[in-house]
Image: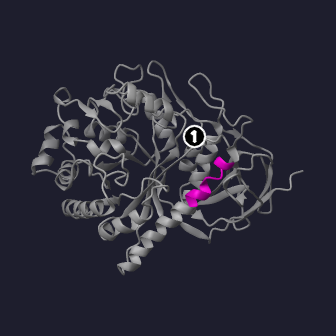
Amino acid sequence: MSNKNAKLVVDKELKIAEIDKRIYGSFIEHLGRAVYNGIYQPGHISADEDGFRKDVMELVKELDVPIIRYPGGNFVSNFYWEDSVGPVLERKKRLELAWRSLETNEVGLNEFAKWSKKVNSEVMMAVNLGTRGIGDACNLLEYCNHESGSYYSDLRIKHGYEKPHNIKTWCLGNEMDGPWQIGHKTAKEYGRLAEETAKAMKLIDPSIELVSCGSSNIAMPTFPEWEATTLDYTYDYVDYISLHQYYGNADNDTADFLALTQDLEEFLHTVIAACDYIKAKKRSKKKLNLSFDEWNVWFHAMQEDSETMEKRPWQIAPHLLEDIYTFEDALLIGLILITFLKHSDRVKMACLAQLVNVIAPIMTDDEGGAWRQSIFYPFMHVSKYGRGVALLPVMTSTKHDTVKHEEVTDVESIAVYNEEKEEVTIFAVNRNTDENVLFEADLRGFEGYRVLEYSIMEHDDMKAYNSLVKETVMPKEKTEYRFEDGYFETSMGKCSWNVIRFGK
């Protein structure tokens, strides 16, 4: 019998915040096979009249992604948006410097806006502040959002799009702190440029929301000074600051890998502190929120990617960043989503990077079908059932240490209350690699509720993965639990993802 235990008290009065559904956003960059042979493949058996793959669209709809960041990523820092609109045969082919590929511009801004509507999503547009600046950002916004009667809005109409796209969320550049970025800037250079770009864009359309560039990751030598310096310039004009972070298990240490959300907690606390420092410094009443617009596990295919870009550059849609995700990756995705929900008072948007083929939950075969990677499922569960109010997890759990982390909770958990549907969902990960944990939840505040469904993901092999021919990592129903007088109890399997739904 395991002596490991965890207890969660679920109380509808203890609210963190109303969850912004955009926390379940994603990302499509002109990179590898994300666009070409990903979302778009004319001639494919499932292609619709616009060349978009219907099998992919169905899977994207299953994930219910409310916002999708576009067109990058590193790609955006050398993106000439004018090349991506107008008659397709007249569009310029360009050397794409970020990923050393050839960009045909066959799919551009208007096509992507059309596709995003088909999958019930909004566009989060990024502007190029690497090789370009204020004027081009304003022209792009005018093209997208202005009704008519100006040069760029009339150009959009001429291109066959009478109604404006009305894109409401805009990123002011991408990872401008990174030396790898085309047009990399110092914090002061970026701060000034982003401030002036933001001011100009809000003159064109005051209803838009703007995201200021944060650090590329927690390990950047300029973090968190970058946040403090850039926000000194942009704070009054922007609505969010971005965070990016990818995780890997290069040491092949599952226990330590599943403890990485401790680092994520630290990252979030530090960025929130930087935002609030500038708020205090400016004596501002405005609270700045976070857009975690790039996050995922990314490490599996890095060596192959470097080789492709170095030795075989300038291909159209080469196989790049095609990480094949394992069961343990899915567990970390669940843990990250729980962490975002814990901070839903400040994390208002997040983008799983990316959506199709490129470090993605959805993979496609050029000749055949599409399939769900292991990470598809926890993301789908939380996107589907994590709508409503995030409840403060009053939680106790036994703990363990790993090689690089101390006092790691065996179980991480949070509950979401959907008042409209009269449902409560508990998301939980047992990240103890050796032992089951006795998990108890006190739901006495939810009288008349019963268990609607208990879904789990477990696997004996941490490296198990899905493919086109076989899906080995997927959820299944669990029936071994007790729920009496408002108390829920179960033995939560080691290394497991758990979704427990209660309803009236």
- Tell me if 233 is positioned left or right of 437 in this view: left
Say whether residue 255 is magenta: no
In the image: residue 404, left or right of residue 108: right
Q: Amino acid at mark 1?
A: Ile
Q: Quadrant of residue 170?
A: bottom left
382 or 185, nearer to the observer? 185
Residue 325 locus on image (x, y percent)? 58, 35
- Report if residue 44 is visible in the image: yes
Q: Which quadrant of the figure contains the C terminus?
A: bottom right
Q: Which residue is mark 1?
A: 375
Q: Report helix, strand or loop for mark 1.
A: loop
Q: Position of residue 250 (x, y in %)?
A: 60, 40
Q: Is residue 422 above or below residue 246?
A: below
What range is drawn magenta here? 256-265
Residue 55 x, y percent position in the rendering: 46, 28
Q: Which SS type dominates the magenta stretch? A: helix
Residue 422 visible here: no
Residue 265, located in which quarter of the rendered image? bottom right
